[in-house]
Image (cartoon, helix red, strand yellow):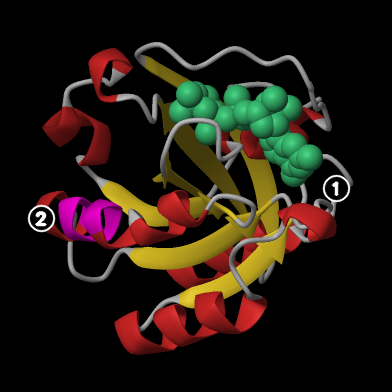
């Protein structure tokens, strides 16, 4: 594993947002440590993890912040978003409410971050096809309407997780 003081050309901050239990923490642990837990606990406060990525011959150290979806466990909103150049806006394809709340998350994000923050809309838990409540087309349409990138992922099956984070990271520099 790469260490903190390894030479890097850029360091940037990205944030994960979305309702509780959509899979933010598991997407992060899958991307940074290739770990997944079925019994993970809700995040309290803020957590973060790093991963170095090579883009166009440069090493980018991505510092990815994760907070609680539940209001009562959340970190101070303004400091969470401060300096973020990228965001993954995550919902759970098996719970329509989490998709409906995307508009709320997006307006908070836009209120606290810079207008050029790269935003990727992510429909997680694509492995649970039989419980699907949000069609892939709905995610695509919302992303088009709001000018976001879009992907469906599965942290459990490790599908499109790499692609979701990299599509954000590669567009930042
Ligand atoms: P908060 O910290 O409360 O905001 O939740 P969170 O968004 O971080 O969710 P978390 O990663 O803790 O995952 C919540 C639950 O969903 C856990 O039981 C995970 O195992 C499960 N989960 C996460 N991603 C997936 C996935 O891709 N597929 C399936 N089937 N379950 C998942
Ligand atoms: Mg969490």
Position in image of residue 116 (x %, y %): 26, 71
Residue at x-position 83% and y-position 40%: 156
Q: Residue at x 44, y 59 (%)?
A: 99
Which is nearer the eye, 4 or 102?
102
State the image coordinates of residue 27 (x, y, percent, origin top left): 66, 40
Question: Foreground: 32 or 41?
Answer: 41
Q: Is mark 1 within 8 Å of ligand 1?
A: no
At x 44%, y 79%, the residue is 143
Q: Which residues are magenta?
A: 104-109
Residue 158 disc label: 1
Give the numbered dot on residue 111: 2
Q: How many marks?
A: 2
Q: Earlier in the sequence, mark 2 or mark 1?
A: 2
**Quadrant in which the C terminus is drawn:** bottom left
Q: Does 78 sit left or right of 143 as displayed?
A: left
Q: Disc 2 versus disc 1: distance between alpha carbons?
A: 32 Å
Q: Quadrant of residue 167?
A: bottom right
Give the side of residue 97 with respect to residue 170, left or right.
left
Q: Residue at x 31, y 14 (%)?
A: 73
Tell me the quadrant of the picture where the N terminus can be found: top right
How packed mark 2 is, by other alpha carbons closer than 10 Å (few <14, some 14-19, many 20 or more), is few
Above or below for 144 versus 159: below
Disc 2 on helix, strand or loop? Answer: helix
């Amino acid at each position: 594993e790469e260490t903190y003081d390894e030479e890097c050309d850029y360091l940037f901050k990205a944030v994960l947002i979305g309702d509780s239990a959509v899979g933010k923490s598991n997407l992060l642990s899958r991307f940074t440590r290739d770990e997944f837990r079925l019994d993970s606990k809700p995040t309290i406060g803020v957590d973060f993890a790093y991963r170095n990525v090579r883009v166009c011959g440069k090493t980018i150290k991505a510092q990815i912040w994760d907070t609680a979806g539940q209001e009562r466990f959340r970190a101070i909103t303004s400091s969470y978003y401060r300096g973020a150049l990228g965001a993954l806006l995550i919902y759970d394809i098996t719970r329509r409410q989490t998709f409906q709340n995307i508009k709320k998350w997006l307006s908070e994000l836009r209120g606290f971050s810079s207008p050029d923050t790269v935003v990727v809309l992510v429909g997680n838990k694509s492995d649970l096809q039989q419980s699907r409540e949000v069609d892939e087309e709905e995610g695509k349409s919302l992303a088009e309407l709001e000018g976001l990138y879009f992907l469906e992922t599965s942290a459990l099956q490790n599908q499109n997780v790499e692609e979701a984070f990299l599509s954000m990271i590669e567009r930042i520099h």
